[in-house]
Structure formats: C-alpha cells, structure tokens
C-alpha cells in the first residue's frame, strides 16, 4: 500500500503506525500495529480514538493484512474481531461493512486496499464539507464551548466539531473557545487544548463542572459537539458529559449543535435507548494515568459506574451538521435526515 500520513495514522514500509493519544500532549509516540490483537489493544486503551479514526484504522489494517498474504477466511475473522472492539461508535461498523464487500471481490488485495484508501479520502472530504456547513452557523465574535476531542486527531481530515470551530476562527468569527477537561479521561484537557494551541485558536480550559456558571453569566454563545452514533430519530450518543451540557444549553437558551459525517448515522437504530453504551474500567474513575505515571485517589475497591458515553435526545439539539448540510429539528421531527443546504 502507498505511503500515507494523517494526524494520527501513518503507513510506512507496509505497516500501520498509530499516534498514541494517551501519551499526548507530553509525548508524541508512534506505535507499530502489525496485527488485529495489537489494534484492538490500542482501541480499547484509547491510544487510537475518535469514531471516524477507529473505523479508518481498522480498514487500513485489514487492507495491509490482505497485502501481506492473510487468507480470505482469516481476514473475515479479523474483521469481526475488530467490529467488536468498541460497541458504541458506529463508524467502525459502517467502515467494516464496506471492507466486507471488498473482501467478497475476486481480487481481494486490490479491492481492500482501494476501499481503505477511498475511506481515508472520503473522510477528509466529509470533514471539509462539515466545516463549511457548520462555520456558516457561527456568528461574529462567538464564544464557543466544546467537549471531548473532535479534531484532526479523531479523523483523517480537519475534524468534525473542532473542524467547524477552526474554520470559524479562520473566517474571523470565533472570539474564543471554552474547552471542557472531559472527565474521566481528559480528552479535552489533553487533546483539544493541544490541537487548538497548534491551530492558534484562543481557548481556556475549564473543569466540566464550570460550564453551568459560564452559561449563567452569558459567556457561552453556542455549544459544539461531535457524535459517536446518531439514531434514526436524531438522538445522539457522544462522550459522557454531553447530555448534561445539552440540558444546560437548553435551559440557558444557547444553541447546541452536533457535527458528524453521514458514517455516524445509524438508520437501523430507532432511538437513543437502542444504542449500546460501553462500560469502561473502574481505574479510569478512581485515579488517572498518563505519560506522567499513575495516581489513585479513591478508596481501594471503590464501587464505580463508568459509562463511556451518554445519549442526548433530539429535542435538545439545535441542528445536526452533516457533510450533506445542516439538518433542522423540524426535519428530524418529520423523519427526514435531509440537508438544509449543501456544504
């Protein structure tokens, strides 16, 4: 396969390399990813994360395994192992469905390589269209709030919600960005703050619990989120803490937007209640780990509830910014995921 490079993925010498997002921002470590077990480990440890990026990394690895001579039956098994790696992010399933079609072709190697690279190119184009459509919603002087990480680290392109924010900044309409730390894994504090700094976008990092007071003081003009799965009725699964921000935004009459590619739509999922929510290890809540080491603050054997995602009902969302354009609440109520305008 050709040499390839995105913010978080590389192919060099016919091998996949993953940027370890658990080591950022203190260290930039590229992890070799030669097989399915290695990639599943990276996905579960969140060394590779972000709904679009997870799907793309799985697609690239399957194509490389095909090029390296893995038999068709073994590739089919590997595909299903990868499918189970993270249950909530539907981009993984959507990408693997396309790779499965490629696996059924006569020239498997060529078909899988072509499809994996097509998915990369498509994701870059989707991100550009999302940025164009979403930035049109950003008023001059906007003070925006975002949660988790939705930039180039999580996609092959400029990102989803963070891509919109960056485009708004380039157009001169973003005054500043409030960045939630995003407990318990601090993707906002570690990743979004780093990305915004690299882009030159002015930001201030806040604890998750500070958002309400900022809204009450009139210091937030809009909230921008990504998504890991969007149900057919418009309900959205996203990083834990998203729902509480949607409730706060609704109470304070602040627009709450979700930016995501069409690969995040799950038309077979009727509503948020049907979205599987991943439960993660207690250690993520009882302490914190990173390139600095590990710290534990809770009592030993403390009981923990640690869902990775929550579900925001469609009734709290002001607009869904897809690569096809902006979808309004009225369109979602009518059962139409159709663009208001083209991005």
Image (spheres, rainbow, N blue to C red):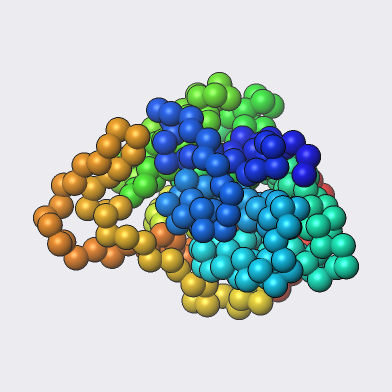
Q: Percent position (x, y) of residue 155?
A: 63, 45
Residue at left 85%, top 55%?
110
Closer to the camera, 77 or 118? 77
Closer to the camera, 206 or 55? 55
Q: Percent position (x, y) of residue 56?
A: 66, 52
Residue at left 36%, top 61%?
280
Quadrant housing residue 96: bottom right
**Is residue 303 in sight in this rendering?**
yes
Closer to the camera, 70 or 12? 70
User: On the rendered structure, is 191 left or right of 121?
Assistant: left
Q: Percent position (x, y) of residue 217?
A: 37, 38
> Quarter of the image containing the N terminus?
top right
Seen as rendered, the residue at the extreme left is 299
**Is residue 262 in sight in this rendering?**
no
Residue at left 28%, top 65%?
305
Residue at left 84%, top 59%?
111
Instruction: Relative to 52, say whether 293 is above or below.
Output: above
Quadrant housing residue 136: top right
Closer to the camera, 142 or 88? 88
Q: Percent position (x, y) of residue 125?
A: 77, 44
């Amino acid at each position: 396969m050709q040499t390839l490079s995105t913010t978080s993925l590389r192919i060099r010498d016919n091998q996949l390399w993953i940027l370890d997002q658990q080591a950022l921002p203190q260290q930039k470590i590229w992890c070799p990813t030669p097989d399915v077990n290695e990639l599943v480990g990276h996905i579960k440890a969140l060394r590779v994360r972000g709904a679009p990026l997870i799907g793309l990394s799985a697609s690239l690895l399957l194509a490389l395994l095909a090029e390296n001579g893995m038999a068709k039956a073994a590739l089919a098994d590997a595909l299903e192992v990868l499918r189970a790696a993270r249950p909530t992010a539907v981009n993984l399933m959507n990408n693997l469905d396309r790779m499965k079609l490629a696996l059924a072709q006569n020239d498997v190697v060529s078909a899988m390589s072509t499809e994996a690279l097509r998915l990369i190119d498509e994701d870059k184009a989707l991100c550009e269209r999302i940025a164009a459509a979403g930035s049109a919603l950003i008023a001059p002087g906007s003070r925006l709030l975002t949660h988790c990480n939705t930039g180039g680290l999580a996609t092959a392109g400029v990102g989803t919600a963070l891509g919109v924010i960056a485009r708004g900044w380039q157009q001169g309409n973003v005054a500043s960005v409030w960045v939630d730390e995003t407990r318990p894994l601090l993707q906002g504090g570690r990743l979004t703050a780093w990305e915004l700094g690299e882009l030159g976008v002015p930001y201030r990092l806040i604890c998750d619990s500070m958002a309400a007071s900022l809204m009450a003081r009139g210091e937030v003009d809009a909230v921008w989120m990504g998504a890991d799965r969007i149900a057919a009725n418009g309900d959205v699964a996203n990083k834990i803490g998203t729902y509480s921000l949607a409730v706060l935004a609704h109470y304070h009459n602040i627009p709450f937007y979700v930016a995501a590619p069409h690969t995040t739509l799950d038309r077979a999922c009727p509503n948020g209640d049907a979205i599987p929510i991943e439960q993660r290890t207690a250690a993520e809540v009882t302490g914190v780990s990173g390139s600095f080491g590990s710290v534990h603050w809770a009592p030993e054997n403390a009981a923990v509830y640690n869902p990775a995602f929550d579900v925001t009902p469609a009734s709290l969302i002001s607009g869904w910014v897809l690569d096809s354009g902006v979808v309004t609440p009225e369109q979602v109520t009518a059962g139409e995921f159709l663009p208001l305008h083209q991005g």
